[in-house]
Amino acid sequence: MILTITTKPYSDQKPGTSGLRKKVPVFQQENYAENFIQSIFDSLEGFAGKTLVIGGDGRYFNREVIQKAIRMAAANGFGKVLVGQAGILSTPTASHVIRKYQAFGGIVLSASHNPGGPTEDFGIKYNIGNGGPAPERITDAIFERSKSIETYKIVEAADIDLDRIGTADVAGMTVEVIDSVADYVELMESLFDFDAIRSLIKSGFRVVIDSMSAVTGPYATEILEKRLGAPAGSVRNAIPLPDFGHHHPDPNLVHAKELYDDVMSPSGPDFGAASDGDGDRNMVVGKGMFVTPSDSLAIIAANAKLAPGYADGIAGIARSMPTSAAADRVAEKLGLGIYETPTGWKYFGNLLDAGKVTVCGEESFGTGSNHVREKDGLWAVLFWLNIIAARRESARDIVVKHWAEFGRNYYSRHDYEGIDTERANTLMSELRAKLDTLPGSRIGDLTVEAADDFAYHDPVDQSVSKNQGIRVLFEGGSRVVFRLSGTGTSGATLRVYVERYEPDPSRHDIETQSALADLIAAAESIAKIRSHTVMDTPTVIT
């Protein structure tokens, strides 16, 4: 029986950079999740009888919302649902499953790198048929619908057994519980030289991956330990937990410090990596070398032909605007196209679909390629292992040689988290108000060359995205970028990105914060960060 349930709209269901993210108690309000899911369906056309993929990162409230989404999909006319076993699908896997099985789209339940638990974060986002996040025209339509919704549709049916692989019927719609890992592992084996990596590990090269009690544990265990022969226990925190074991599943130098310290110790592993809550982010650490996400993208692009899946070369590179210009140096030398987009993986989709780029990256620990339409943490880790296995050089040596060839982009991101939203908005408003007066001004020894509020003109569909971050560009190629993050759930997060290009190899071993000290001071002078945020230092520096 299809039920039509009367409901009242909520005013706060505007999707951010990656879907709708709120605290669990917000999603537990009456009809809150149902309203948003129905708003998604009401904003789509042509899905009758088609397949919908559903899965999530296993965080608290994941299973309950999956059951609701299944029953609502049946009521709204989908013909089939593919759902990951135990409700688990990493975000890149969900993208791959949508593409492989030619699904109409997918609902991904995740709040990415944010904490999980009864009072922590939850999220819902919709991915379209190419496997990528819904573009703004769809997310805008979803938000508009959510503001006026009066009813939602759902069928009366028993819960699906999510732990048993197989098929079931829900009001005439087929529900297939699929192996969460198998399709993704098969894809990785087609892209990378598993034999070479296996040989590297067999030679004594020690690899550890911290899955942070999040979604990639089963994937990393199957690939690293079972397929590539790493010793049992090489994947740490491998069991996905609803609260991520009280960890903050964000792979950076603060939340993955234990892994970093281990790799840096004399007796530690040769290579370490970490991934986040939903498996789309990564951190790479070699003995004696933390690899920044911006450098990682550039080095993967420069060495792409070493991986079998990219042996014919790459078409081009895309990076988010705040990401350093390290990839630009590679594109220039190799004669490749380079595209600068706003933050958000959805902006890469058109470029990938049009064949303009092959690899993409964001400074927020996200890297990926045209194999899916999401960033992919384990893919990046395997690419690094493939490069190391092919070159038989350490991660540190690979990075240092890359700098010598292309120059080094000193780069750091300063995050000010949990700021009062009104204060954060005031900071950005005051910055915008002074943009016209900044060019030509001197701040210490720095001269401002240009300043703007970044706008992106999509070369494929000609759409325009404005107000994507304030850029202050200095003579000589240095810059500071200010941007409010769209991925948090509490207060506002100000991100300040600082970058200096250094072509001289004799100046490539300066400590990063020291190399950027004058730019950091300039950022404070321009934006008055301390007074606006009421914070003396950033919450996180990466």
Image (cartoon, rainbow, N blue to C red):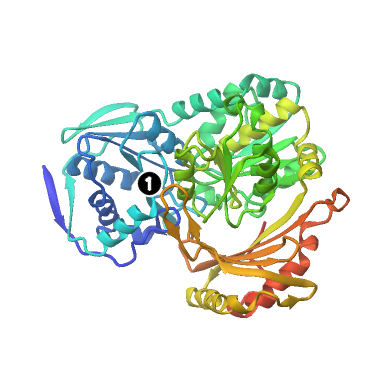
- Please say if 69 is above or below 431: above
The quadrant in which residue 140 appears is bottom left
- Please say if 531 is above or below 227: below
- Please say if 103 is above or below 329: above
Quarter of the image where the C terminus is located: bottom right
Location of residue 538 in the rendering, given as x and y in whole percent from the top left corner? 65, 67
The quadrant in which residue 478 appears is bottom right
Who's the residue at 60% across and 37% down the image? Answer: 380
Task: Identify the element where label 1 is drawn.
Answer: helix
- For disc 1, the neighbor class at 10 Å (few under 14, some 14 to 19, many from 20) is many
Who's the residue at 45% across and 49% down the image? Answer: 346
Left or right for 199, reference 147:
right
Q: Can residue 90 be seen in this view?
A: no
Quarter of the image where the N terminus is located: top left
Q: Is residue 520 visible?
A: yes
The residue where tag 1 is placed is 62
Instruction: Tell me the amino acid under the disc marked 1.
Output: Asn
Left or right for 438, reference 410:
left
